[in-house]
Image: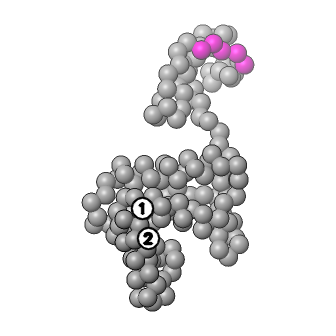
Amino acid sequence: MKCPYCGFDESKVIDSRPADDGERIRRRRECLSCGKRFTTHEVIETVPIVVVKRDKSREVFNRSKLLGGFLRACEKRPVSMDQIEACIDSIESKLQSGLDREVTSDKIGELAMDALRGLDDVAYIRFASVYKNFADIGTFREELNKLDSSK
């Protein structure tokens, strides 16, 4: 690691500890040339997931878009932010652990609906109505019947 003070290429690690809930490693280093100490942070490099949308355009997966959809669906419902974050973490982890670097928006929508189905019925129906683009009350009723029969 290059010293930020003198530019020397070698340093020794004095202390290492996890940071940000284990997402990073904080390392305290000492330059072998000038002896000054500095801190570095290591982060796991992840390959970005590309979302293939319905119109065949592609964009990088954006966690905040998924969070926004969950927040709208769960608005005024007895669902905590921790529960929502846990669902999104689970979805993101499934996407990262998959072998495909490209995933369809439909796949993400299905994962979101599965998570919401177990979380809150009203939030599930709200999300499904937008995701499945319910055209009329009949389609809405069919989804409600599927929800009733699964319980």
Residue 13 % position (x, y): 59, 14
Residue 132 % position (x, y): 52, 77
Looking at the rendering, the stretch of residues picked out in magenta corresponds to: 9-13
Q: Main secondary structure of the magenta part?
A: strand
Residue 64 visible in rendering: yes
Residue 67 visible in rendering: no
Residue 69 falls within the magenta-colored stretch = no
Of the numbered discs in the image, which one, if any, rests on residue 116? 1
Residue for badge 2 = 127
Q: Quadrant of residue 29?
A: top right
What residue is at 41 percent from the left and 88 percent from the top? 137
Q: Secondary structure at mark 2?
A: helix
Quadrant where the image shows the C terminus: bottom left
Rendered position, 135 above or below 4: below
Residue 4 % position (x, y): 63, 24
What residue is at 59 percent from the left and 34 percent from the top? 43
Number of marks in the image? 2
- Sort mark 1 into few (<14), some (14-19) or many (20+) by Cα contacts within 10 Å: many
What residue is at 51 percent from the left and 74 percent from the top? 131
Using the numbered discs, state the Cα–Cα distance from disc 1 to disc 2 in whole angstroms.
8 Å
Callouts 1 and 2 close, C-beta under 8 Å: yes
Using residue 60 as the reference point, say whether residue 146 is left or right of it: left
Task: Please state which of residues 34 and 111 is positioned toward the viewer in this rendering.
Answer: 111
Q: Quadrant of residue 37?
A: top right
What residue is at 49 percent from the left and 31 percent from the top? 22
Amino acid at the residue labelled 1: Leu
Give the mark, 1 or 2, whose residue is nearer the N terminus: 1
- Sort mark 2 into few (<14), some (14-19) or many (20+) by Cα contacts within 10 Å: many
Rendered position, 147 above or below 119: below
Amino acid at the residue labelled 2: Phe
Quadrant where the image shows the N terminus: top right
Task: Please state which of residues 55 and 42 is positioned toward the viewer in this rendering.
Answer: 55
